[in-house]
Image: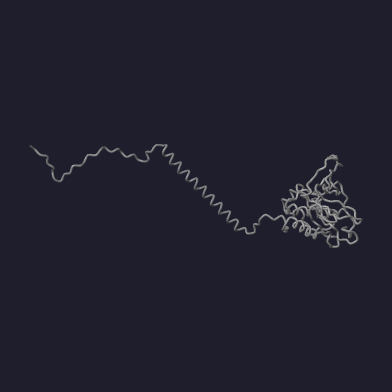
């Protein structure tokens, strides 16, 4: 019986299953190649956007550093009152009149600021309501179209001349349109500072100095909404004169003062309402001087 014999030096190789041929990458189908290309494009686009943003940020920083003179928005005024509500009103009353001058160079008026009230022998009684009669002379309003405003949200200023021959009258110069215009400018400036820096104020009334005979010389009554645009820009753009004096206003400034105050000049009278509380009645037009 013959035996299987393995010849020395010869090794049987194990049989392998038939291998599948390798498929080169370049043979991938078109959809796969498109997908890979799309990813590469998106990555490049994101990189470019990030690079642009970084470049813009660096550029802005360089511009800011290289422009140390770039100033913030100007403040509304170089001075402002501080403290409580009534303290601010009194500071405004003390400060604003000091800039206004007579032809001699003396101060034109002083001012007293307070909540709107009627002074009695014993106390100041708050005014409950302000009634404003319309100007019916132009046919644009009926005489009974009377507006009413809350006296409790009103600040009042009383202007007083420094003459000695009559209480609170201005005695150095004769009454004139120019002098009354300067007084109106002062009323406007007092109102602007009050609306800007004093809370809970809807109205400001400024009582003009009386005549040398002690007669009333009218008032300027301004509402916050009357000056809304002016409160959004620095006051020196509106009223640039540093030392306003009688007859000294430039044409542009004079025009602004007239425009803002002319329709709001009133004669005034204090009275008692049906409940006995003080009221203030304003009627156009008022004399001035």
Residue at 32% x, 40% y: name it. 22
Q: Which quadrant would residue 120 be assigned to in this image?
A: bottom right
Q: Is residue 83 above or below residue 132?
A: below
Classify residue 46 as left or right of residue 179: left
Residue 91 image offset from top left, x and y in percent:
76, 59
Q: Is residue 92 above or below residue 286?
A: below
Given residues 147 and 5, the one toward you in this image is 147
Residue 26 image offset from top left, x and y in percent:
37, 40
Q: Is residue 18 above or below residue 109?
A: above
Q: Is residue 268 visible?
A: no
Q: How many marks?
A: 0
Given residues 43 and 74, the one toward you in this image is 74
Q: Is residue 17 above or below residue 222?
A: above
Q: Is residue 29 visible?
A: yes
Q: Which quadrant would residue 108 be assigned to in this image?
A: bottom right
Residue at 90% x, 53% y: name it. 215
Q: Residue furthest right?
A: 213
**Quarter containing the N terminus:** top left
Residue 87 image offset from top left, x and y in percent:
75, 58
């Amino acid at each position: 019986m013959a035996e299987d014999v393995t010849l020395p030096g010869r090794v049987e190789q194990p049989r392998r299953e038939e291998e599948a041929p390798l498929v080169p990458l370049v043979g991938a189908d078109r959809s796969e190649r498109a997908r890979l290309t799309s990813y590469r494009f998106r990555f490049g686009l994101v990189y470019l956007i990030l690079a642009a943003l970084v470049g813009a940020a660096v550029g802005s920083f360089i511009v800011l550093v290289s422009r140390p003179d770039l100033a913030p928005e100007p403040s509304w005024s170089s001075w402002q009152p501080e403290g409580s509500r009534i303290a601010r009103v009194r500071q405004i009353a003390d400060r604003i009149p000091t800039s206004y001058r007579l032809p001699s160079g003396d101060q034109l008026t002083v001012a007293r600021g307070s909540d709107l009230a009627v002074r009695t022998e014993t106390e100041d009684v708050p005014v409950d309501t302000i009634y404003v009669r319309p100007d019916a002379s132009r046919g644009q309003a009926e005489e009974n179209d009377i507006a009413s405003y809350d006296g409790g949200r009103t600040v009042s200023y009383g202007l007083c001349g420094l003459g000695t021959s009559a209480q609170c009258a201005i005695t150095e110069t004769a009454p004139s349109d120019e002098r009354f215009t300067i007084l109106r400018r002062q009323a406007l400036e007092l109102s602007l500072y009050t609306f800007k820096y004093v809370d809970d104020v809807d109205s400001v009334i400024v009582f003009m100095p009386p005549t040398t005979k002690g007669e009333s010389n009218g008032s300027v009554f301004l509402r916050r909404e009357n000056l809304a645009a002016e409160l959004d820009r620095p006051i020196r753009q509106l009223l640039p004169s540093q030392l306003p004096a009688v007859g000294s206003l430039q044409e542009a400034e004079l025009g602004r003062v007239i425009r803002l105050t002319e329709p709001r000049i009133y004669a005034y009278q204090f009275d008692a309402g049906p409940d006995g509380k003080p009221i203030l009645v304003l009627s156009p037009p008022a004399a001035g001087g």
